[in-house]
Amino acid sequence: MAVLGSIALACTTALVPGAAAADTVPGVDEVVTSDNLVHLANVPKQGAFASTGAFNSDLAFTGDYAIGGNYNGFTIYDISDPAEPQIVSQVLCQGGQGDVSVSGDLVYFAVDYPRADEDCGSPAVSASDPDAFEGVRIFDISDKADPQYVSAVRTDCGSHTQTLVPGDDGTDYIYVSSYSPSSSFPNCQPPHDKISIIEVPKDDPASAAIAGEPVLFPDGGNHDQPGLLLPTQGCHDITVYPERDIAAGACMGDGVLMDISDPLQPEVIERVQDDNFAFWHSATFTNDGKNVLFTDELGGGGAATCNEEVGPQRGADAIFDVKGKVGTGNEPELDFASYFKLPRHQADTENCVAHNGSLIPVPGKDYFVQSWYQGGVSVIDLNNPRRPKEIAYFERGPLSDTSMVTGGSWSAYYYNGHIYSSDIQKGLDVLQVNDRRLRGAENVTYEEFNPQSQPRYKPGRR
């Protein structure tokens, strides 16, 4: 493991609020925003994370720190002053994907590319190697300037994403989502209609181990729908809502609701499909749990799908009503409400599609901030789930006006008064929305935030 510490670089990118009209593509690297949004800062990728192939990925938050995943490891940012974020340390530990969760002094890190063994620095190997490692690595970040590798847990087909499910007894459970099995992969055999659950005793994380491998699709998932990027073989991502004992799974060809009242035995209680969806990617509940928003990663995140040709109903969000409630005898059902698609067309050299986001905790309201890769970041009013609308945005122009270069906002989340966007190529962006509709959100302060472990806003919480 390589730890690079004490790097304190932040820059504020020149921006022109509202400079590009909704139907105008900004110039290369030009930053534009709506009039009610300010681009406070940008921290470029550094060192071993700076190359084009070292994608920045997901984010998690603890106290005054953001944890940023990268295909080569993770970065810890000091965000105590959001206008001047600083890199505290970088952990070089290759493995691809780099989905992160944080729990106290522990960071969980997803490894989805096979390595020779579980250690940082181990070389890449073929998935046909029976000794190859993929799964979840665990780090101790009690010293933010000097994180320490603790242990790792191998999971079948690796860990494309992982979701923290906090336990009540000093135990964390991690739902590991993975896919793409093959008969030639010893550690990723079909059928792969399951997830892996890792149990982590927080006082002894080195003893973390697989606690279950529940099969979510005992009769098989959606394999036959025309236009699917991949058939349902496992899940891509899961968002849990622990206070409501419910989870939403985005499972490639299927969207599912799960009862997680027993976190070791999640049970699929509702399942939907959509002819307009090519790849069910991620999910977010409204605060009252009465709606859930699923995203469709049409083109796998590498294609230009935010253009007039693709249209407004593909590569979009699908919003569903959740009718019923776990444990009441009236089990939840999903009813389609509407689609939402980024309203500004993007260039044909920009990969753009619906991606990761989170709620903005406005009392009694539902506002959502979402990444769209090179489509940028959008703030969406979800209060009428049948008529969602954008109320603010941030975007850069294409990385190139002649060829496709994969980039843009992988994840955009609201945390303690600001929006943080993990840009694949450009690093960490910090945004501030100034809009009267979002009043009250600034009074909500979380000590820890993992967007796929969705907290419920409670009045008076500070």
Image: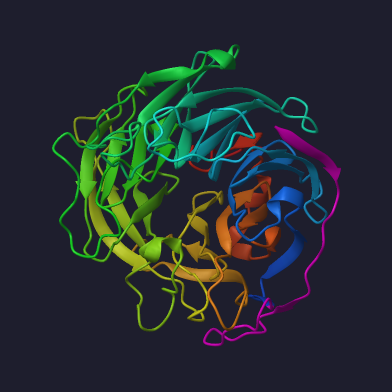
Q: Compared to 55, does 204 lie above or below?
A: above
Q: How many marks?
A: 0
Between residue 9 and residue 256, name the one nearer to us: 9
**For the stretch drawn in magenta, what is the main secondary structure?**
loop
Expressed as whole percent of the image width and height from the top left, the position of residue 387 reads 37, 69
* Quadrant of the snapshot with the C terminus: top right
> Which color mode does the image show?
rainbow
Residue 164 relative to residue 34: left or right: left
> Is 16 colored magenta in this rendering?
yes
Expressed as whole percent of the image width and height from the top left, the position of residue 327 reads 26, 28
Residue 94: quadrant of the picture: top right
Residue 454 relative to residue 18: left or right: left
Residue in the picture at 49% in, 17% down: 168
Q: Which residues are magenta?
A: 1-30
Residue in the picture at 58% in, 65% down: 408
Q: Compared to 460, does 304 lie above or below?
A: below
Residue 377: quadrant of the picture: bottom right
Residue in the picture at 25% in, 58% down: 336
> Is 98 colored magenta in this rendering?
no
* Quadrant of the snapshot with the N terminus: top right
Q: Is residue 455 visible?
A: no
Residue 302 relative to residue 329: left or right: right
Expressed as whole percent of the image width and height from the top left, the position of residue 328 reads 24, 30
Residue 444 relative to residue 218: left or right: right
Between residue 123 and residue 243, name the one nearer to us: 123
Q: Is residue 329 visible?
A: yes
Residue 190: quadrant of the picture: top left
Expressed as whole percent of the image width and height from the top left, the position of residue 87 reads 79, 46
